[in-house]
Amino acid sequence: MPVDKLRIAVLLPCYNEEAAISETIAGFRSALPTATIYVYDNNSRDRTVELARAAGATVRTERQQGKGNVVRRMFADVDADIYVMADGDLTYDPKAAPEMVRMLVDDQLDMVVGTRLHEVAEAYRGGHVIGNRLFTRLLAGLFGRSFTDIFSGYRIFSRRFVKSFPVLSEGFEIETEMSVHALELRMPVGEVETAYGARPEGSASKLSTYRDGWRILKTIGTLYRVERPVLFYGGLGALLIVAAVILAVPLVITYLDTGLVPRFPTAILATGMVIIAVLSFFAGLILDTVTRGRREMRRLAYLGHHAPAAPDEA
């Protein structure tokens, strides 16, 4: 069916965005006239809710603080064919949305990420740029491939992505979880370069460089442990084996020379490390079977929904 016949939902998670929410809504209404715009307020203490309603958006509230909690609620509540998600702070360009939607439909994709291009230094702090590059490379190293901008909050989703995505994150690590979900299910995805602007006066970033960076790092580690248990626990076992061999070599040399084992505590420690290493390896094998079953269930949930029909299939 034609793109303008598809049900498009614009999802705007917000927290204290009165300086930008009205203009953000107007921008997406102009770019996607047929879309329904939802503003999910996350305990704002300013006039965000009042201004969003005045701008004609459907306003809902999520009491659990954190972007991940908001995304979980949005994906559960909203029924649409295509989902457009962006922050309500006017940093993302609404004019890029039609091109991203057309790419998702024409190429039968499940997610299109708006990679951020910024010309103003205030738009994207240097520490965040470096952190994004480091985490992007880390994700590629752990999962085999990645995206250009894994932390972009500007994304277009198909229905089958949204309804097969078990949101577990609570905060800003949600974008990392989305990226891993797409990679693990081998979903067709795309990227579009989009302008990224500075926040309007009166709007402040809610992202803490170090606190949220640590949470993101923990999330990547957890996802790697859950999605790659053989490599995770096998790697842990290999490290223990190496350490045990290093401890055991002097003991073996002494035994060959004297026929004695003078350091029983070291020998016991090395033996215990080898036992734990073997148990770790087998734990990885067992958990890999569980992970495979979970992945199959997500894949079946994914296949339970149709991709948006391309315009020439109407």
Image (cartoon, rainbow, N blue to C red):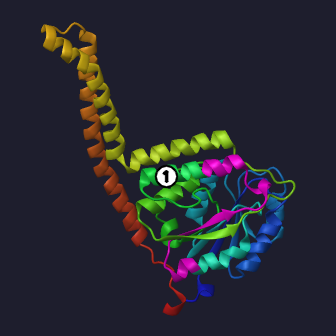
Q: Residue at x 64, y 48 (%)?
A: 130
**Residues shaded magenta:** 103-132
Magenta region includes residue 236: no
Q: Is residue 291 left or right of residue 219?
A: left
Q: Is residue 172 left or right of residue 108?
A: right
Seen from the viewer's position, the closer of residues 49 and 246 is: 246
In the rendered image, residue 55, in percent from the top left (x then y), is placed at: 82, 70
Location of residue 76 by image quarter: bottom right
Seen from the viewer's position, the closer of residues 47 and 201 is: 201
Q: Is residue 245 left or right of residue 165?
A: left
Seen from the viewer's position, the closer of residues 213 and 51 is: 213
**Residue bearing the label numbered 1:** 139
Q: Is residue 103 visible?
A: yes
In the rendered image, residue 234, in percent from the top left (x then y), is placed at: 31, 40
Q: Is residue 76 left or right of residue 198?
A: left
Seen from the viewer's position, the closer of residues 56 and 114 is: 114
Vertical arrangement, residue 304 with respect to residue 239, above or below: below
